[in-house]
Amino acid sequence: RSIGIRDRPTSFRSPWQNAYAERLIGSIRRECIDHVVVFGERHLRHVLLSYKDYYNATRSHLSLNKDAPVPRGVERVGNIVCRPILGGLHHQYGRM
């Protein structure tokens, strides 16, 4: 309140009013939670933190010209190695 920010709650059952949050929640569900058996709150936190790292550093985004939000350099030399993420649900490919 001291800096002039106010809450603007969305209407009940109106997901189109907050499209950015709904898109993120949908991506998390479709790409992560629907494929993982969660064994408790601690495990869920671990899975979500791992997905967050994957989403921001590895996963390609069409809106970013198939780059990640955290830019990465082009690796031109070395053998291509596959690294499983989230127990093999997703994979990161890089050169070693």
Image (cartoon, rainbow, N blue to C red):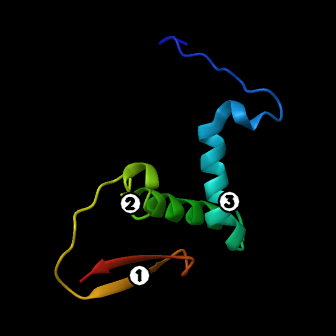
Q: Are marks 2 and 3 in contact (CB under 8 Å)?
A: no
Using the image as rendered, state which of residue 14 and residue 6 is in the foreground: 14
Residue located beneath label 2 in the image: 57
Sequence-first tag of 2 and 1: 2
Check disc 1 and report its element: helix, strand or loop. strand
Q: Position of residue 71 (x, y in %)?
A: 29, 55
* Residue positioned 71% across, 67% down in the render: 34
Badge 2: residue crowd in 10 Å (few <14, some 14–19, many ≥20): some
Q: Are marks 3 and 1 in contact (CB under 8 Å)?
A: no
Is 14 situated above or below 1? below
Badge 3: residue crowd in 10 Å (few <14, some 14–19, many ≥20): few
Using the image as rendered, state which of residue 32 and residue 41 is in the foreground: 32
Real-space Cα separation, disc 3 to disc 1, in angstroms: 22 Å
Residue located beneath label 3 in the image: 29
Real-space Cα separation, disc 2 to disc 3, in angstroms: 19 Å
* Residue positioned 68% across, 73% down in the render: 35
Check disc 2 and report its element: helix, strand or loop. helix
